[in-house]
Image (cartoon, rainbow, N blue to C red):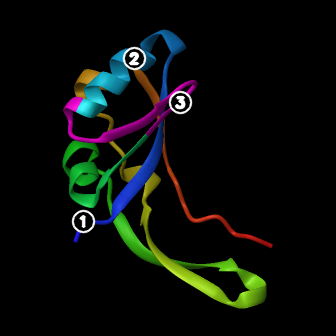
Amino acid sequence: MDAQRIAAEVVPTTSAHAGRVAKALAQMGLRVLHVGASISVDGTREQWEQRFGVWFVEDETTVQEELGKRVSYLRADPASVRVPDDLESLVADVAFVEPPQLH
């Protein structure tokens, strides 16, 4: 069974850096899904922890309130994210995706 993949949006400091950042993320073993104003990527918990120093906690949220549907997921601690030194001047932000809440 594949390890759970955690998605994030990586925002380059300028659009001119998007291709370079995407290539570096792929070389780190992260899967690049889309390159645009931000770069959509995903990776395993271990990849994110090793390369970005981010900490995750197991969390649970309701995604369909009327059905009482709950999902568990790994929530990133945004304060723990450390952009690797070689990307620090090229990356403005890293935002981890959380499950949507449907109403």
Quarter of the rendering containing residue 68: bottom right
Where is residue 1 shown, x and y percent of the image?
22, 71
* Residue 45 visible, this orientation: yes
* Residue sitting farthest toward the bottom: 68
Q: State whether residue 42 is above or below residue 6.
A: above
The answer to whether marks 1 and 3 mark residues whose Cβ atoms lie closer than 8 Å is no
Where is residue 53 shown, x and y percent of the image?
26, 49
Q: Nearer the viewer, mark 2 or mark 1?
A: 1
> Where is mark 2, residue-wise?
19
Q: The disc labelled 2 sits on which kind of residue?
A: Gly
Where is residue 39 shown, x and y percent of the image?
47, 32
Q: Secondary structure at mark 3?
A: loop
Instruction: Identify which residue is drawn at 43% across, 51% down.
Output: 7
Specify the label residue 38 is tagged with: 3
Q: The disc labelled 1 sits on which kind of residue?
A: Asp
Instruction: Identify which residue is drawn at 34% across, 59% down.
Output: 5
* Residue sitting farthest toward the front: 1
Segment tinted magenta in the rendering:
27-40
Q: Nearer the viewer, mark 1 or mark 3?
A: 1
> Where is mark 1, residue-wise?
2
User: Which mark sits nearer the N-terminus, 2 or 1?
Assistant: 1
Compute the Cα span from label 3 to label 2. 10 Å
Q: State whether residue 76 is above or below residue 95.
A: below
Compute the Cα span from label 1 to label 3. 26 Å
Quarter of the rendering containing residue 25: top left
Compute the Cα span from label 2 to label 1. 28 Å
User: Which mark sits nearer the N-terminus, 1 or 3?
Assistant: 1
